[in-house]
Amino acid sequence: VQLQASGGGLVQAGASLRLSCAASGGTFRNYAMSWFRQAPGKEREFVAGVTRYLRPLYAEDVKDRFTVSRDNGQKTVYLQIGSLKSEDTAIYYCAASSSVLSALRTPDSYAWWGQGTQVTVSS
């Protein structure tokens, strides 16, 4: 599975942004798809995901501003980010997993990763 993330950029605080992750190879509908982010000097952290059964998952601190969705026909997963804050500045990675629901917040559960897209929020 190859994953290509896009949609990042330099935005002002309070703005919105939509990230996309296009997949090729594999059987997209069979994978859980998630977004992680990594800020400078910090570990990679789970932010949002959507299971193969279309159940969304969110990190607690972003659930009110982030919306994850997927289009199996387009083999694409999206992350809509609203009310951007400076602490959202990070490289955002999409990832695919065939693991069970309980493991989806853990990076080690993902076998395939995109290259990342930089989101920088200016205050």
Image (cartoon, rainbow, N blue to C red):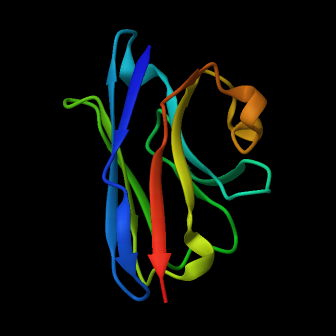
Res 50 visible:
no
Q: x and y percent of residue 43 in the render? A: 79, 50
**Number of dots carrying numbers:** 0
Q: Position of residue 54 (x, y in %)?
A: 43, 43
Instruction: State the residue in front, 42 or 74.
Output: 42
Q: Is residue 117 left or right of residue 105?
A: left
Above or below residue 121? Residue 90 is above
Q: Is residue 112 visible?
A: yes
Q: Residue at x 79, y 56 (%)?
A: 42
Identify which residue, 99 or 37, lies in the foreground.
37
Horizontal side, residue 87 vs residue 105: left or right = left
Kindly indicate the quadrant of the structure image that contains residue 87: bottom right
> Which residue is rendered at x = 68% and y = 75% of the image?
61
Q: Residue furthest left?
A: 73
Picture coordinates of residue 18, whole percent (x, y): 31, 61
Q: Residue at x 72, y 45 (%)?
A: 105
Location of residue 76 in the rendering, given as x and y in whole percent from the top left corner:
30, 36
In the rendered image, the quadrant that contains the N terminus is: top left
Q: Residue at x 38, y 24 (%)?
A: 29
